[in-house]
Amino acid sequence: MNFIFISPHFPNNYYLFCKELKLNGANVLGIASDNYNFLANEVKESLTEYYKVDNMEDYNQMYKAVAYFASKYGKIDFIESNNEYWLELDARLRTDFNVTTGKKIDEINFFKSKEAMKKDYQKAKVKVARYHIPTTLSEGKKFIKEVGFPVVAKPDNGVGAYHTYKITNESELEHFYQSMPNIKYIMEEFIPGNLISFDGVVDGNSKPIFYSNEVFPLQIMEIVNNDLDCFYFSNKDMPDDLLEQGTRVLKAFGAKYRYFHLEFFRLTKDKAGLGKKGELIGLEVNMRSPGGYTPDIINFSKSVNTYKIWSDIMCFNSTNENMNNTKYYCGYYGRRDYRNYVHSDSEIMNKYSNNIKKSGRMPDVFSKAMGNNFYIYISSSMKELEEIKTFISQLK
């Protein structure tokens, strides 16, 4: 198998996807703009060959890199990055080199456009927030009359919570329309609910082979816009309704051979015109691995290796990985450099040495959403999960 992996070195845990592919016997062919000599040894060891381009945004250079690998190794079986930023690049390269194991450029819109996502959520019989594509202020006011304040406005094709606005009154609505960038936006009714995700690996038949549930007490929009600490956790168990609806969404989207990250809200109160308390509302579909160190968090929570599960599906469309191991809650807490915390890093590490599985610095590009210093820790109960969170987060 010839597998081209775009940006195998960043994020810095992604070399693990390549490592498992290589262990499965694949030719792992990396493309990025960093000098080979500057790559970490574990990245080098995970690759069969590496091709350096000057600029990954220059499609001609990326095309030439893939053409080189195709001429040397033969037919390319996969082109993937598992990275939201490069999904369109992946699709364009697949189209030009007739790689059939992923979405082509004319199909990728359903993985990128929030409006398009909603249509496939509805196709899967999953409720979604009512929405409006902003054009004029008068049309916006008609939408507000239907759903009421607050509403959330965000780029239709965007990553994370950047340039996302919560609009709570007419003055803010008018300001949004006056200053809205010249790109397509989507405006949605505000959903009173907790953000949760359905994450895992889907095989070549759109069947989820492995899955996990992550819970986000604070929305990323709140963390980014208010510069808050970041906390979320992997649940020990999978809610039945999330598994059922998530599986339907994967079928509706025709997802195959992918790590996936599907976002939902669970209503915390009744919302007229939308649903009852406790019901799930579909939010976004992301056909790539969940962000940051979430694959590692899932691994610690479920005592598995999802990098291997993903690689097994890519190479064999099945896996022998044991998925019946001991399960834990696994929390992520990201602290901010400018805050004055009660407990030092060494105090945290000493007190919870048996719980903390990974800690360190978050790369600057992710720090706005994820914090600067992070701690990933396991616990056997929600009570212990919260106790550790309180100890890490306490301010002077």
Image: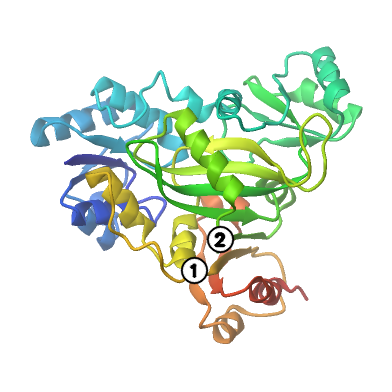
> In the drawing, does residue 117 fall left or right of residue 230?
left
**Mark 2 residue crowding within 10 angstroms, few (<14) / some (14–19) / many (20+):** some
Asked if 105 appears above or below 286 in the picture, the reply is above
Which mark identifies residue 340? Answer: none
| Three-letter code, disc 2 | Asp
Asked where in the image residue 326 lies, by quadrant, the reply is: bottom left
Residue at image mark 1: 327
Q: Quadrant of the N terminus?
A: top left
Res. 290 visible in picture: no
| Residue 160 in the image, given as x and y percentages of width and height | 59, 41
Q: Are marks 2 and 1 in contact (CB under 8 Å)?
A: yes
| Three-letter code, disc 1 | Lys
Q: Residue at x 77, y 32 (%)?
A: 274
| Residue 65 in the image, given as x and y percentages of width and height | 22, 33
Asked where in the image residue 131 lies, by quadrant, the reply is: top right
Instruction: Choose between 209 and 391: the one closer to the eye.
Output: 209
Residue at image mark 2: 237
The local secondary structure at tag 1 comes to loop
